[in-house]
Image: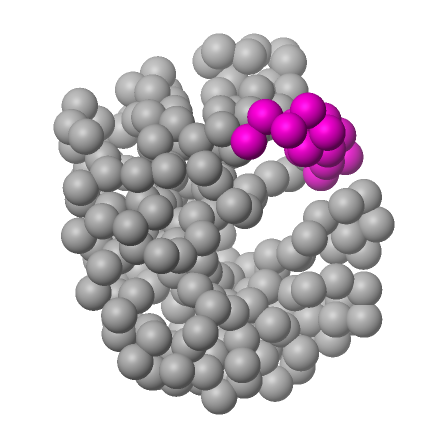
Amino acid sequence: MGRIQAAQGASVIDLGAESSNATAARVGADEQIATLVPAVEGLVEHAVVSVETYEPRVVKACLAAGARVLNMTGREHEDEMLTLAAEHDAAVVMCFGETANVREVSDVSPDADPVPVLLDHFGARLERARSLGVDRVVIDPGMGFFYGNLVDPMVRVRHQTRVLAQTFRLRPLGAPVCNVLPHSYDIFGDEFRKAEGFFAVLAVLGGAHLLRVHEVPHLRTVLNALELLEVR
């Protein structure tokens, strides 16, 4: 699948061995390594490979296998993981999260302006990453993760949309922004696979630099159209 998505136009292939869903079973570091390392080795000749984990041992093994991006979804061992990224000259996607890792459920304020919280959250973390020698950091506002008070799908997608549309306000941080694109089954119904294209337009106009997607061919067409039309 990774090779297919790379051929379809994906810039980065993100691999993970444990679901980020709060209700999913946990996967130990040894099992993650056994799953991820062969996959990384099989893809590095075809694409830029990113690895999603919050376990330092998994980070070390996957970067040694050729992964070039760390998708960091936990903070418990942040300094250790950032140091490993610096040692391997890897880029880091730094995900928003107030807990040790994104599987530990937290809440957000869906009615509040989300940007001040994001600015406060990432400011110190970015400074620390740079002090440890990580030169390339992308921030992810974490809109794809589960939040305990965003169980209503419409409340959730409104919050996600607010972040997508106001990404430009994160520019003072001096880091590119990665945004996940909702599927919003409640709005798009049977046409949910087209939702990413709709939200991609909002994200790009809002100032996103990198998009997490599943529908690669569709999104590549949408992004190419936006570039040709010079709407950004």
In the displayed structure, 223 sits above or below 136; it is above
In the displayed structure, 134 sits above or below 140; it is below
Instruction: Look at the magenta stretch and give its main secondary structure.
Output: helix
Give how far across and how far down residue 199 sits, in percent: 52, 25
Give how far across and how far down residue 141 sits, in percent: 35, 45
In the displayed structure, 95 sits above or below 161; it is below
- What is the quadrant of residue 227 in the picture? top right
Q: Residue furthest bottom?
A: 87
Give how far across and how far down residue 134 sits, in percent: 42, 76
Please name the residue shown 48% across and 40% down the image.
Answer: 208
In the displayed structure, 221 sits above or below 155; it is below
Quarter placement of the C terminus: top right
Residue 59 appears left or right of 99: right
Is residue 224 inside the magenta stretch? yes
The residues colored magenta run 216-232
Q: Residue furthest front?
A: 230
Residue 79 appears left or right of 117: right
Give how far across and how far down residue 178 sits, in percent: 47, 47
Is residue 208 inside the magenta stretch? no
